[in-house]
Amino acid sequence: MIKVILSRLGESLVVLLVMSFVIYALIGLMPGDPIDIMVNSDPNLTAEDAARLRALHGLDRPIIERYLSWLGAVFQGDFGYSRISNQPVMEVLLPRLGNTVLLMGCSFVLALLIALPAGIFAALKPRSIIDHAINLTAFAGISVPPFWLAILLIILFSVVLGWLPAGGMGDSGAGFTNNLLHLVLPVATLTLATLGGLIRFIRAAMIEALRQDYVRTAQAKGLHPFQVVVGHVLRNAMIPVTTILALNFGSLFSGALITETMFGYLGMGKAIYDAILGNDYNLALVGLLFATLTTLLANLLADLAYAWLDPRVSLG
Amino acid sequence: MRRLFSGIGALVLGLATLPAIAAENLTIGITQFPSTLHPIIDSMLAKSYTQAMTLRPITAFDQDWKLICMLCTELPTIENGLAKRETYQQDGETREGIAVTYKLHPQATWGDGTPVTSADMVFTWEMGRDPRSGVANLEGFTRILSVEVIDNKTFTLHQDRVTYDYNSASLILVPAHIEQPIFAADPAEYRNRTAFDRDPFNPGLSFGPYRITAIEQGAKIELERNPTWWGTQGAFDRITIRIIENTAALEANLLSGTIDTIAGELGLTLDQALAFEKRNGGRFDMLYQSGLVYEHIDLNLDNPVLADVKVRKALVYGLDRELISDQLFQGRQPVADSSVSPLDSVHSADTPRYDFDPGKAKTLLDEAGWSVMKRGIRHNAAGEKLSLEIMTTAGNRSRELVQQVLQSQWRQLGIEVTIRNEPARVFFGETVTRRKFPAMAMFAWASSPENVPRTTLHSDQIPVAETSWSGQNYTGYASVEMDSLIDAIERELDFEKRKVLWARLQALYAEDLPVIPLYWRANSYPLPKWLKGVRPTGHQLTSTLWIEEWRVEGRD
C-alpha cells in the first residue's frame, strides 16, 4: 500500500511538471499581451514605453526561457509576484483558497447529504411519483444556468424579502452569523447546480446494484430492507459514485467562477480566471497547478477507497 | 455638597442618554479592483476613482472643463510671469523649452503630518523617469528636463518644448519621505515593494480629504476622513467602495441596499441604466453625462473599397445615427460629427455634418462604380460584390445591438455587411493594434479635454512591424495637411488661434472621413434621493475628485 501511494505521488509530480509547461505555453500562446492592451488604452504610450514595459515584466524573453526561470524560482520556494495584484502569489491565493474550500466544501457536503437519500429513494421506488419528482428536481438542477439561478436568488432573498445579503463575504470581524448569512445564497446556488448530476448518478448506480443476484440472496435470507440497502446495495453502488466524487473533489480547490463572480465571492475560480486573462503567469500557474494536484490526490484517495469498498480490488 | 453631587450625577446621566451622533457612511459599487494603488504606475480607472479621494493632481480640468489648480495656488501662465520661454542646448543644438513655476498649497500636508513639499516633486520626477520604476508612460516625465527647487513649496519645471498644454501638470505627487528609501533600495523591485501596495494604510500616503483605512483584496476598499486635509470637509465619516464585477449583481446590490450608489465611471452600461430607470426610477435619481468616450468605426484605408472617399461618405450618409441614439439610447448618447466632443472648448459647430440621406448615399455609391444591383447587393463593373466586414468586441451587448442596426441600414443601400466579433483581448491585442481588421473596427477612444489626436491621425503613427506596432492610427490615414495641423496646434499657445486650427482639423476630418463617427458615450449615475452634489465631469477625471462637495440631504 505504501509503495503504491509513493509510486502514485511520484507520478503526480511528473504530471504536475508536464502540466506546468503546458499551462505556461498555452497562456503564452494567447493572442495579445497586457502591454498591447495597455498601449491600446493609453494613446500616450509610445513604442519605447511598450518595449520597456515588456522588458520590465520579462515578456520580451522567449517563452521557454521564462518558463525555466519560473521553474527554477519555484524549486527555491519563490512563487513570485502576481502581476495584476502586485502582491506575492501566495498572499493572494491562500486567502482565496480558504474561501473556496469553505464555499465548495459546504455545497459539496450539502449536495451529497441531499443527493444520497434522494438517489437511493428514487432507485428504490422507480417510476413512482416520488421518483418522478426527484428526477424533475435533478433535471432542473442540471438545466438551470448557475448565473441565472444566482440572480434569481439574489432578487428573491435580498431585494424582495431582504432576508439575506446580496453578495460579498461579510466584513472581517463582523461575526460568525454575518459570515454565515453571506454564505447561504452562493452555497445554495452551487448545491442546486451540483445536486442534479449527483442524484442521477447515485440513482443509476443503485438501480444497477439492486439488480444483482446477491441482493435477491440477501432478501431471501430475510434481512431487513434497510440492512439490504445500506449493507449490501449501497456499498457496491458507491464504487462508481466514488469516481464522480473524486473528480468533484478537485473542484473544491479550483472554485466556481460564475458563482464567485455573481456573489462577489473571493475564491480561486475568479482568481485563476483573472490571472489567465491578465497574463499573470505566476498566479495562473500556481492556481491551476494546485487544482491539478488536488484532482490527482482525490483520484488517489478514490483508488484507495475502491480497495476498501471492494475487497476484490487490489492496489499495485 | 449633596446637592453638588446630585447635580453632577444628573448631568452625567443626561449626557449618557443623549442620542449618539450617527456616523455618515456611503457605500459605492464599482466593477473593478485596482491592480495597484501607486498613483503613477499603471493607469486604471478603478485606481483613479479611489485615489481621487486621497490624492490630488497639481492641476486638473474641473467639471466645467477649465484648467484649475488643485494642489497649487495659482495656475502658471506666460501672462502672469510664472511661465517663461527659455532655450537650452541638446545634442549640439539650441532648442526652445519653457520653465513653469508652481507654488504648492501652504497647508498641503500628508496624512502623517509631513508637509507636501518640493522634495516630493523632485522624487516623483526622478522615480517617474527611471525606466526601472514600472511607470507606464515615461514621456510625461522625460519631457521635464529638470526640477528646480525655489523653496520648500515652490519649484520650477524646465520642460523640453513649448506646447499649448505647458501649464497642465496632471501628475500626482508621491511622498518622498516614505517612498524614496524603498526606491533607493532597489529601483527594479520598487513596483513590487511600494508602500502604496505593501502598506496602503500608512497615513503618509494621502493628503486628500480621505485616506485608505481597510482593504479586502478584490472585494472592498474603505476610506475615512483624513484629519490633515486642509479643504472643505467631506460629508461622510466613512466611504466604502465595494467591487462587484457583474453588473446584474451590482444592480441587485443597489436595490437591496447593500450599496448606496453605483459609480457612473465604472458601473452600469447605458442600456442597463435605462432599463434600471424604467423599473426603479422612482427610488433613485438618475444622472446621465455624456463625455469624451468617442464611439466610432475605424476604416481600414488599405481596403480598396474603403480607399474611395465616396464610399466612406456613402456609408455615413446611409446611417441614421440619430435614430440609433434615440431608439437604443433614448437620446442620451449624442451623435458625433468628429473626434472632438461638443463639450470641448475647441469644438467647431461648423464641422460638416452627415445627416441621414440614403438618396445621397446611393448616388455616391453609383458614382464610385458600385451601380450594378444583383439580388439586392451592389456590384461593380468587374462583378465584385460590395461586401464589408465589421468587427467589434464580442460580448459587448450595446455594440452588438448597434452592429445589427448598422448592418440593416447599410443593407438598404445594397451593401453587404458581415459581422465578426472577437473577445476584447484578441480584438485589441492583435486585430486592431496590428491593423488586421479587413474593413471596419468599432470601438471607443477615451481622451481628455483638447487632446491633440497625434497618435490616431498623424501619418507617423500608423502601426507597422518596423516600429513594433506603435501608434494608434489604425486606419492608415496619411494627410500632409492633417500632419501639419497637428504639429501647429501643439505649438500654438494662443487659444483663439488654436481654435481656428482646431476648426480646420475637424473640417478636414469630416471631409476625408478616415473614421465613421458614431456617438459620445454617456455614463449613468444612479443616486439615492438623499445624495446631492455629485457632478460628473464628462472627461477622464472622475467625479470623486470633488468628493468633499457630495452631501446628504434628508437621509433617514
Image: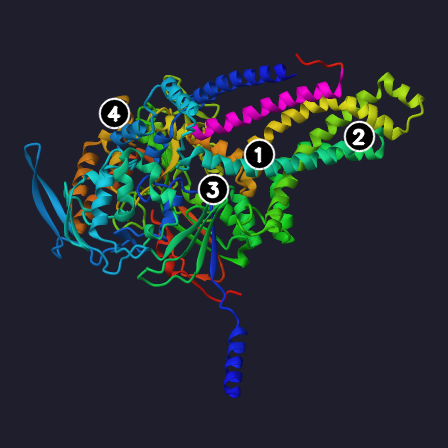
What's the CA distance linking mark 3 and mark 1? 16 Å
Q: Which residues, given as a range, are shown in magenta? A: A282-311
Left or right side of B88 for A177:
right
Pointer 3: what residue? B218
Picture disc at residue B467: 4
Find out whether residue A77 is within the magenta segment.
no
From this viewpoint, is residue B364 visible?
Answer: no
What's the CA distance linking mark 3 and mark 4? 37 Å
Q: Are marks 4 and 2 on the same chain?
A: no
Foreground mark, 4 or 2? 2
Residue sitting nearer the eye, B240 or B368: B240
Q: Secondary structure at mark 2?
A: helix
Find out whether residue A297 is within the magenta segment.
yes
Q: Main secondary structure of the magenta part?
A: helix
Q: Are marks 3 and 2 on the same chain?
A: no
What's the CA distance linking mark 1 and mark 2? 27 Å
Q: Image point 56% across, 39% down: which residue?
A: A99
Q: Secondary structure at mark 4?
A: helix
What amino acid does circle 4 point to? Answer: Thr
What's the CA distance linking mark 4 and mark 2? 68 Å
Foreground mark, 3 or 4? 3
- Chain containing the residue with disc 4: B
**Earlier along the polypeptide chain: callout 3 or callout 4?**
3
Q: For the residue carrying disc 3, how many other residues have a C-alpha within 10 Å: few (<14), some (14-19), or many (20+)?
A: many
- Chain containing the residue with disc 2: A
Pointer 1: what residue? A256
What amino acid does circle 2 point to? Answer: Ile
Q: For the residue carrying disc 2, how many other residues have a C-alpha within 10 Å: few (<14), some (14-19), or many (20+)?
A: many
Picture disc at residue A120: 2
